């Protein structure tokens, strides 16, 4: 098997794809081939030595496409290194309380899949582009008091990807490294 990694993502308005592409670009610097794909378009994982999966948050939950990806591929993911990332406007203010809240969005997902042990979980702010929102989404954002703008910290995203690269690529097949740091 060649050294090939997958960065899969679920997005609604495009913010998460740009995070996934950035993670993929950093992983490429570690001499690994990387595919960046929509989670719903991935049919199998046999060609990948490691997987990164990210999702935007909607109504306090990971997007259904990301959850479905984990469930559909759980056997393959249990025997290869897996890292997860979350894109949430809650992280626009990176506080311990907000980190705890955003990590809590993953609890129901990972609780249903106890064999999946991510090597790390990245928590990132997102972007609200009012021009991309429909009428009801704009009203919901206004009601929540979420300010429009791009709150993604690209240095934090790149640093996280560089940090997980050896965790993903040095694991023995069938024995993924353990211990998500939650950063």
Image: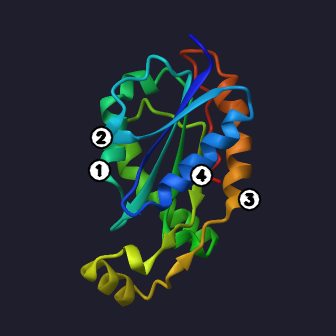
Question: What residue is pinned by disc 2?
Answer: 68
Q: Position of residue 100 (x, y in %)?
A: 54, 63
Mark pair 3, 4: CA separation: 13 Å
Is residue 100 shown above or below 81? below
Asked whether the viewer can see residue 97, the reply is: yes
Residue at disc 2, secondary structure: helix
Mark pair 1, 2: CA separation: 6 Å
Which residue sits at x=38%, y=82%?
141
Residue at disc 4, secondary structure: strand
Mark pair 3, 1: CA separation: 28 Å
Label 3 or label 4, whichever lies nearer to me, is: 3
Q: Residues within 10 Å of mark 3 (few under 14, many from 20)?
A: few
Residue at disc 3, secondary structure: helix
Label 3 or label 1, whichever lies nearer to me, is: 3
Question: What residue is pinned by disc 3?
Answer: 155
| N-term mark: 3 or 1 | 1
Mark pair 2, 4: CA separation: 19 Å
Q: Position of residue 133 (x, y in %)?
A: 35, 75
Q: Are marks 1 and 2 in contact (CB under 8 Å)?
A: yes
């Amino acid at each position: 098997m060649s050294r090939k990694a997958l960065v899969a993502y679920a997005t609604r308005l495009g913010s998460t794809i740009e995070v996934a592409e950035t993670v993929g670009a950093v992983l490429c610097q570690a001499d690994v081939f990387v595919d960046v794909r929509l989670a719903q378009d991935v049919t199998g994982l046999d060609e990948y030595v490691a997987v990164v999966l990210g999702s935007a948050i909607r109504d306090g939950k990971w997007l259904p496409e990301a959850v479905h990806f984990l469930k559909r591929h759980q056997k393959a993911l249990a025997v290869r290194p897996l890292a997860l990332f979350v894109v949430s406007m809650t992280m626009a203010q990176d506080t311990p309380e907000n980190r705890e809240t955003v990590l809590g969005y993953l609890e129901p997902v990972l609780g249903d899949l106890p064999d999946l042990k991510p090597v790390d979980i990245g928590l990132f702010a997102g972007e609200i582009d009012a021009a991309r929102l429909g009428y009801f989404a704009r009203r919901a954002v206004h009601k929540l008091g979420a300010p429009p703008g791009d709150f993604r910290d690209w240095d934090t995203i790149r640093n996280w990807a560089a940090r997980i690269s050896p965790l993903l690529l040095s694991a023995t097949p069938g024995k993924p490294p353990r211990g998500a740091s939650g950063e």
